[in-house]
Image: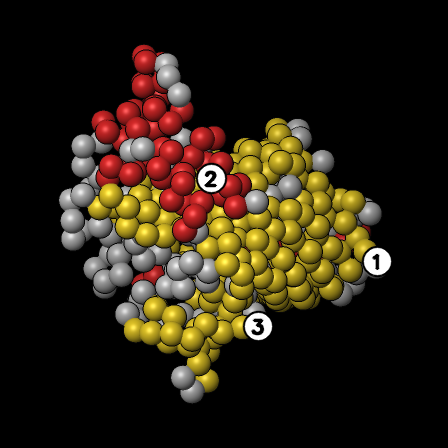
Amino acid sequence: MRSKMLWPLGALMSLNVFAQELPENYIPVKPTAMGGAFTAIANDENSVWTNPAGVARIRKARTRKKVHLVSFPNMVGGINAQGKTFYNNFEIAKTHDGGTTAANVSKALNQMTKIDKPIWALAEANPIAFMDLGKHVPIALGAYTNTHIKIAPDGSSSSLEDVELVSDYGANLAFAFTNASNRANFGIQIRPLLRYDYSDQVDVSTLVNFSKLESRVKTQSNSTHAVAIDIGGMYTLADFWFPTIGFAIFNMPTGCQDNYLNPFSETRQKICGTKFTGKINNPDSLYVIDPTDIRLGVSITPRLFHRLSLRFAADVHHLYFQQGQQYDGLPGVDASKLIHGGLELFVGNPLLPPPFSVQVGLSQGFFSAGFVLRMGALAVQFATYGEDISAEQSSVEDQRTLVGLSLEF
């Protein structure tokens, strides 16, 4: 099982890693394009990652069927600017020289004489089905995999790089409860998952040697498991603009990690959330616990014309609750990283996933943009956004791109 975490090294041909980023369970495309402001929207397959209460809003109550939406394979790929350079170098090596994958990875990295910015890549998949368990009790059932890999300059040595590789394999089981008008919703999600994570300093000679890197990751990674619980609620007022308020709590505090090295407060603290157990080679890994993430959001949907509407949303994420020396969530995160805002222009019924929509947003002080296009059963999503990778008050932007592809039935 442990070797499964290595598949992106051969299949993705991209790499990802250290810098102080806010933890995310899964990065969905459309909500990211909206700056992450989706807690009071959550009306599509992304509801399981933004607000479980939205499982009831995939379809209008009167049009839901026993199985009213299947999204398969629901794949997402992501890469940053430095990752694109690496990928281009890999393609050139493969085209011109042939050779093995390992040799071409080494050649691509050797072409990048200095890794002065992080190389980052992401691969996700979340095939999922939405159905009715009973009257006013819609559910979601899915499986997911989420792998990211990053390589970043160590800063203290020109011969060392910080390497981070994390793979999750899990399942979604979400239950939503709704009233007859479908304006009030509550949801709960259970996510059992396996995690393989590796984070350490790696010398450049090992980094460009595929077999050495593979052996090191296999023997030194954490191999853990956990069961995460998420809840959420939404309420829409009886108004033409559909003003909606929402809340979500991801990684309910079911366990705590003592002496967790919080990268934002730069102190060791007792942090609670979803705690992982199993084989732990690196107890200081940031991924031995997924801290509780409390989110609040509001949205309104003014209709411009009969078939054209706008949607405005604002969120606050990664709020925390303190009990003495115990923290449910992560303290010390700069306020500018917690605020999210977004706007969506779309055609179609405001209560159904639109056939075409364009999104813009603001997250962590950086702009984002994207679109969703549905052509029959095919759904294509795109997002570009900035991620703050600095632990300091002065932000550092890492520009990233996400592309999603799925068939919807």
Q: How far across and how far down the image is residue 154, in percent? A: 22, 50
**Can the viewer see residue 311 in this picture?**
no
Of the two numbered discs 1 and 3 in the rendering, the one whose residue sits closer to the viewer: 3
Q: Which quarter shows the N terminus?
A: top right
Q: CA distance from mark 1 to mark 2?
A: 41 Å
Q: CA distance from mark 3 to mark 2?
A: 29 Å
Q: CA distance from mark 1 to mark 3?
A: 29 Å
Q: Amino acid at mark 3?
A: Thr
Residue hosting label 1: 134
Q: How far across and how far down the image is residue 83, in percent? A: 33, 35
Q: Amino acid at mark 2?
A: Leu
Residue hosting label 2: 6
What residue is rendered at 65% in x and 53% in y?
Answer: 172
Residue hosting label 3: 254
User: Left or right: 142 with respect to 23?
Assistant: right
**Can the viewer see residue 143 in this picture?**
yes
Q: Earlier in the sequence, mark 1 or mark 2?
A: 2
Q: Which quarter shows the C terminus?
A: top right
Q: Are marks 3 and 2 in contact (CB under 8 Å)?
A: no
Q: Amino acid at mark 1?
A: Gly
